[in-house]
């Protein structure tokens, strides 16, 4: 059973009744609810001590999911550094929707992670462009969302290790919506959909992608690499 932590700043749910009606248990609660089958899932939020990400929680977490939007700057830099180190050591990280601007994602990417955006209740069609990827297992040719926030190119991220979905929006824009990276020993997945005023995380196809991503991001079981000065494995002959 994998140890999964779902982190959410949990601010929109406190301030916006529309969001509260869609996600009465919070976005973190909605995501945790569909991941609990087969995983040991806990949640953490911004206003908890240490943002709910204590050393004990991080040490036990195998995959961390991150949703944030309006309070990125309130996340303590020391916590970001600890999360970064856990990713480098092998913890999986799944970055959702507006968490493209989170400190942890920008730190791991090394770029601004900026983009175009628009809220216009428009259709989004997420096309699968890498059907053999394990995150796409069970997903049809595309996922269609009746209403979503638009994100448009240029998306200022490093070239993904793997680009597996591309979004088209009713207004004409396209966007790299499902991207994977490897950082140190850890695997990182960015997945675009999930604006707070739409019921995106109740969509079973979106849930499937996230479930698959959790499995994909599972830490690899192996001996930790050894760094620094090393003794030779074989006898080195005298020159």
Image (tube, rainbow, N blue to C red):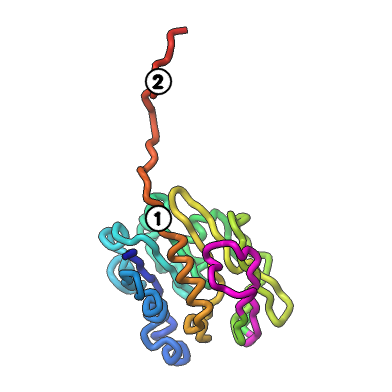
Q: Would you say 47 lies left or right of 117 here?
A: left
For the point 37% across and 46% down, the residue is 222
Q: Is residue 118 above or below residue 81?
A: below
Q: Is residue 201 above or below residue 44?
A: below
Q: Earlier in the sequence, mark 2 or mark 1?
A: 1
To which quarter of the image does residue 79 belong? bottom left
**Image location of residue 11, percent across then percent down:** 41, 80
Q: Are marks 2 and 1 in contact (CB under 8 Å)?
A: no
Q: Which residues are magenta?
A: 120-143
- Magenta stretch: residue 138 in it? yes
Label 1: few (<14), some or many (≥20) within 10 Å?
many
The residue labelled by disc 1 is 219
SS class, disc 1: loop
For the point 37% across and 50% down, the residue is 221
Q: Would you say 150 lies left or right of 137 here?
A: right
The residue labelled by disc 2 is 234
Q: Which mark is residue 166?
A: none
Q: Is residue 11 above or below residue 188?
A: below
**Image location of residue 75, percent across then percent down:** 40, 66
Q: Is residue 215 visible?
A: yes
Q: Is residue 117 visible?
A: no
Q: Is residue 164 above or below residue 142?
A: above
Alpha carbon of mark 2 to alpha carbon of mark 1: how far? 31 Å
Q: How many circles with numbers are drawn on the protein?
A: 2
**Residue at the top extreme, as displayed:** 239
Indicate the quadrant containing the N terminus: top left, top right, bottom left or bottom right: bottom left
SS class, disc 2: loop
To which quarter of the image does residue 112 belong? bottom right
**Image location of residue 84, percent across then percent down:** 41, 55
For the point 65% across and 84% down, the residue is 123
């Amino acid at each position: 059973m994998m140890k999964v932590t779902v982190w959410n700043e949990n601010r929109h749910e406190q301030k916006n009744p529309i969001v509260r009606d869609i996600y009465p248990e919070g976005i973190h609660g909605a995501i945790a609810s569909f991941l609990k089958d087969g995983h040991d899932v806990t949640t953490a939020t911004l206003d908890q001590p240490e943002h709910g990400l204590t050393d004990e929680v991080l040490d036990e977490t195998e995959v961390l999911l991150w949703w944030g939007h309006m309070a990125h700057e309130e996340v303590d830099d020391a916590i970001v550094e600890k999360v970064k180190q856990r990713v480098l050591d092998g913890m999986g990280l799944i970055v959702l929707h507006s968490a493209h601007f989170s400190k942890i994602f920008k730190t791991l990417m090394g770029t601004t992670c900026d983009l175009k955006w628009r809220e216009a209740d428009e259709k989004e069609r997420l096309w699968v462009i890498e059907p053999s990827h394990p995150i796409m297992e069970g997903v049809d040719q595309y996922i269609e969302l009746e209403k979503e926030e638009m994100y448009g190119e240029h998306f200022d991220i490093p070239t993904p290790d793997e680009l597996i979905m591309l979004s088209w929006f009713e207004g004409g824009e396209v966007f790299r919506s499902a991207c994977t990276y490897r950082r140190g020993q850890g695997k990182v997945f960015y997945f675009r959909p999930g604006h707070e005023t739409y019921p995106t995380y109740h969509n079973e196809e979106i849930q499937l992608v996230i479930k698959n991503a959790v499995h994909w991001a599972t830490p690899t079981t192996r001996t930790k690499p050894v760094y620094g000065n090393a003794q030779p494995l074989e006898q080195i002959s005298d020159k």
